[in-house]
Image (cartoon, grey):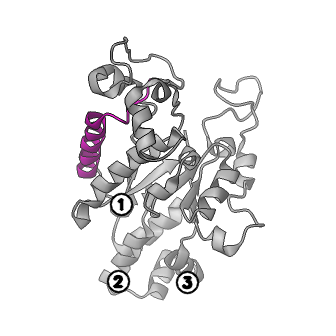
Amino acid sequence: MAASYKKLFKMLIDREMKSKDLAAKAGISPATLAKMKKDGATISSDVLVKICTALGCTLDDIVEIVPEIDIPGHSQAAVASYPEFLACDPENPHEVWKWQGVSTDVINVSNPKAVQFAKDVIDELIELFPFGYIHLGGDECPVAKWKQNEACKAQLAEIGSQNFRDLQINFYRQLSDHIKQKPAEKQRKLIFWNEILYGNTTMLPNDITVMAWVGADRAAVEAAKRGLNTILSPQIPYYINRRQSNDYGEPTGAGGGGDDVYSTYNYIPVPTNISADVAKYYIGVQATF
């Protein structure tokens, strides 16, 4: 979920209200409003509510929902449901997991029917979520079964690569091309987890966004150096469902007990030692469950 400042300032124009008048009515400084308009600024939800109230709108008018459908990994249930065209080994049994983890049962990206399945899912998402972005996941996608599948190996040779991770990138390329063929109002930009950087991202359009979670600081820099927008969501300390301490009474959960409010608050997303040319690709942060 994200607040669209673009929509907010369009409302400002539509209502023929001057920025200084809005700032006065909302009780914020003109400088804060100017920064929001120029490059975005982190503001509290109560200030955002004040701005919306001053504009005569609600948060619902400016909040956008970004759906995430994780493919081709984390697709165990889909593969179990349609093994005849999603599985790399349809002759073997496939089941829906009742536990969490990383499954090797990933989608067979070399099967045209699997690609069409993914396109159909995206078409549904576009109709359900009329906003600017769709998140296609991309994390924790083992390539073991692709390495054993003859069609996958043939496709890898066809795209001129020896890196099996490029099969995943090629899969996304086909989905991106599918979206690009749609009318303007159906266009969507794509977001991926930072494992996408393990492949040749030059096969994809440069308007994708990389969400950095594992090895986040290093991954964000790598994404930015490739000219890709990046959002910081480091597993530590922005996964806010992790244990905050080892004290008696702390709810059980993931983590070693050090993911507390202090660590989250004091984390610096944009390193001070990177150039402005790299820093401009850092577009935000996300708290994750």
Q: CA distance from mark 1 to mark 2?
A: 21 Å
**Counting other residues with Cα less than 10 Å from the Cα at mark 2, is it few (<14), some (14-19), or many (20 or more)?**
few
What secondary structure is found at the residue carrying circle 2?
helix
According to the image, label 3 marks what residue? 30
Residue 111 sits inside the magenta stretch: yes
Comparing 35 with 191, the one in front is: 191
Mark 2 belongs to which amino acid? Answer: Ile
Q: Is residue 25 above or below residue 68?
A: below
Question: In front: mark 1 or mark 2?
Answer: 1
Residue sitting at x 42%, y 26%: 149
Q: Residue at x 56, y 62 (%)?
A: 44
Residue drawn at x 66%, y 59% as measured from the top left: 221
Amino acid at the residue labelled 1: Gly
N-term-proximal mark, 3 vs 2: 2
Q: Which residue is mark 2?
A: 13
- How many numbered dots are placed on residues in this image? 3
**Residue 40 position in % (x across, y down):** 54, 71
Residue drawn at x 44%, y 23% as measured from the top left: 105
Q: CA distance from mark 3 to mark 1?
A: 28 Å
Furthest toward the top, the residue is 93
Residue that label 1 marks: 132
Camera-near label (3 vs 1) is: 1
- Quadrant occupied by the C terminus: top right
In the image, which residues are magenta?
105-128
Give how far apart the Cα atoms at labels 3 and 2 are.
16 Å
Inspect the magenta stretch and tell me whether residue 16 lies in it. Answer: no
